[in-house]
Amino acid sequence: MTNKAIFLDRDGVLNKEIGDYICRVDDFEVLTYQIPVLKRFFDEDYMLIVITNQGGLALKRYTEEELAMMHQILKQTYVKQGADITAFYYCKHHPTVDGECKCRKPKSGMVLDAIDMFDIDPEQSVMIGDKPRDVEAANGAGVKGILIEPNQQLDYDEIKAVLNGK
């Protein structure tokens, strides 16, 4: 059976956008008001998959251990509310340090990797992000993209309409 997913940018969608890299776990604030909407999709058998650029790693602004702690906080917050995040994909490259890579959004590498790993049907899936590059990465993988404002509350009916091609 082919799976379906809600792909999610991280900063500004799942946690508070602060306008800079989130370098400290203390500055990582989960947007708990997103959980009820995403739990509805989780309950409808959608996988919740995070797709995030983390160029601050290449810039040595924070470590992979600190990033893992932030992702653990996010996952635990969702599990406590009866939902779960299936996977976290992150690009640790930065163009000024690493040059081009296939994973950094707006490229579609992370989305394509998740589709391949979890046998996801792109046509039954969406990606939600707060930057045009999130939508571009989704579209490049055959997934519909939804652009929201940073920290905007998700709307179940709007996401469902996009999934249903309306």
Image (cartoon, rainbow, N blue to C red):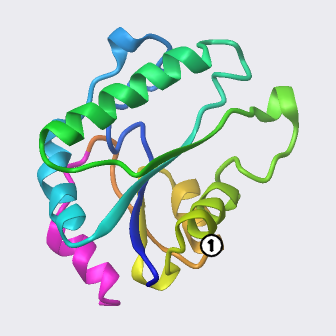
| The N terminus lies in quadrant | bottom left
Residue stretch in magenta: 152-166
Q: Quadrant of residue 100?
A: top right
Q: Quadrant of residue 17?
A: top left
| Residue located 42% across and 41% down the image | 10
Numbered disc 1: secondary structure: loop
Q: Is residue 32 above or below residue 19?
A: below
Indicate the position of residue 130 as horizontal and vertical percent values.
42, 50
| The C terminus lies in quadrant | bottom left
Q: Is residue 62 above or below residue 104?
A: above
* Label 1: how many Cα within 10 Å (few below 14, some 14–19, many 20+): some
Q: Quadrant of residue 97?
A: top right
Looking at this view, name the residue that lies furthest to the front: 1
Q: Is residue 117 left or right of residue 15?
A: right
The residue pinned by badge 1 equals 141
Does residue 20 show up?
no
Indicate the position of residue 36 as horizontal and vertical percent values.
11, 52
| Residue located 20% across and 72% down the image | 44
| Residue located 21% across and 33% down the image | 77
| Residue located 23% across and 77% down the image | 160
Q: Is 118 in front, or is 25?
A: 118
Does residue 57 show up?
yes
Q: Is residue 107 left or right of residue 39?
A: right
Indicate the position of residue 19 as horizontal and vertical percent values.
45, 26
Q: Is 81 in front, or is 158?
A: 81
Q: Is residue 57 above or below residue 30?
A: above
In the rendered structure, does residue 155 fall within the stretch colored magenta? yes
Q: Amino acid at mark 1?
A: Ala
In the rendered structure, does residue 124 fall within the stretch colored magenta? no
Looking at this view, name the residue that lies furthest to the right: 99
Indicate the position of residue 92 as horizontal and vertical percent values.
68, 32
